[in-house]
Amino acid sequence: MIMEKGISSVEVLPSKSSQVTAVKVVVKDPETKQTQRGKRVGFVLVHAGAGYHSESKAKEYKHVCKRACQKAIEKLQAGALATDAVTAALIELEDKRLEAGSSEKGDFSDSPFTNAGLGSNLNLLGEIECDASIMDGKSLNFGAVGALSGIKNPVSVANRLLCEGQKGKLSAGRIPPCFLVGEGAYRWAVDHGIPACPPGIMATRFSLAAFKRNKRKLELAEKVETDLIQLKKRRQSNEKENDSGTLDTVGAVVVDQEGNVAAAVSSGGLALKHPGRVGQAALYGCGCWAENTGAHTPYSTAVSTSGCGEHLVRTILARECSCALQTEDAHQALLETMQNKFIGSPFLANEDGVLGGVIVLRSCRCSADPESSQEKPTLLVEFLWSHTTESMCVGYMSAQDGKAKTHISRLPPGAVAGQSVAIEGGVCRLESPES
């Protein structure tokens, strides 16, 4: 395996709007090569949300991402499908366990480090309703759930919907569902053998405390139900005061040994959201996208988004990023998409700040050594992350790495969240294992 990764100089670029600053991070490192006989190849990139990540909790954020990467790679090395690997990563992010020996001991499902599955944000009624979706780049099939309560790992239901949909029509020629919400999603999950989770377990000590705190502030605020701008500012302020942050959607993108890609997202949604609200994590083209190489797509692409669901829905950001990545320069294409299709989108022209982030993966097959007469199949993987929020926590790992690498990307000093773009990433060259 050959890796090129890292961060170097920062260049500030003007955009079409004078209110927007785009931060371009140039990525270039010396190449290193690793090979392991008989090992399967593959790559995973995960994120634990685009939002605010406290410096004091950086170790915990990174640890959660590292475990998610390891779970996905274990699946890939065992020969699992890309969809199974991306699901394994998301389940780990939803469960958010920390190993004994870290700064916290044992099972840590009561952690505030991700807002998905267990311990998600509570809505106005004090209930947890989760969104999740998954897309398979090979079949282009999609599975999603919205406003789902009572299931510990919403992404497992989304993946099951995807798998059941691939089996073909139901009795009497009925089309199988790909997207279910609320009580219907819960009943379908239980009917298909996915265990229910009591509310007392879904809502953790941290999520209940956050709910009570936010509820008190909501009751004291004037016109809070109609003043979304004040709610957003108070939410951002609360994140810093509580030193925990609301990290919104978590996600992952994967490419397997065959070059198949998959993407998935999962979210507990906004704190104190209206019951029944569904965010981008459940919606087609908004939360995730995966598409293999085809007649009109020279590159396989996988995308997962995070941030303000309403902003991501109105810009269909996951699909926009995937389309943009079909051009030659992935880095520039993603930067321009974040500038022109997100921050500068006419659909968000009345927003003071546009908050979101993406992780993207692009892959294609190439020769390991263009000058060599021997054709050795190699998978070239470009991976990037970009955000307009203050920070974004990511992790990545190949099947030939000994451990995952993690990073918290931050806007540079002086950059304004919602009006600035940070973009970083790298390149991974995966060589087929020697027999």
Image (spheres, rainbow, N blue to C red):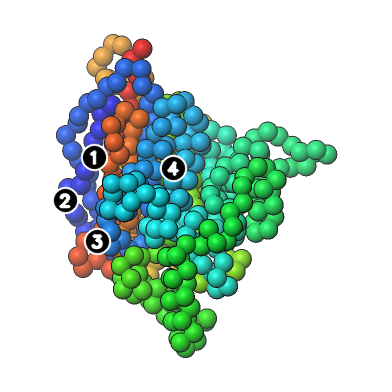
Asked if marks 3 and 4 touch (Cβ < 8 Å), the reply is: no
Q: Which residue is mark 1?
A: 5
* Residue shown at 29% from the left, 21% from the top: 36
Q: Secondary structure at mark 4?
A: helix
In this image, 107 relative to 280: left or right?
left
| Tag 1: amino acid | Lys
Q: Which residue is mark 3?
A: 56
Q: Position of residue 382 (x, y in %)?
A: 33, 38
- Give me the C-alpha separation between circle 3 and circle 4: 24 Å
Q: Is residue 184 visible?
A: yes
- Give me the C-alpha separation between circle 3 and circle 1: 25 Å
Q: Earlier in the sequence, mark 1 or mark 4?
A: 1
Viewer-nearest of discs 1 and 2: 1
Q: Position of residue 223 (x, y in %)?
A: 50, 86
* Residue shown at 68% from the left, 58% from the top: 183
Q: Quadrant of the N terminus?
A: top left
- Give me the C-alpha separation between circle 2 and circle 4: 31 Å
Q: Which residue is mark 4?
A: 89
Q: Quadrant of the C terminus?
A: top left
* Residue shown at 59% from the left, 49% from the top: 144
Viewer-nearest of discs 2 and 3: 3
Q: Which residue is mark 2?
A: 9
* Residue shown at 36% from the left, 62% from the top: 51
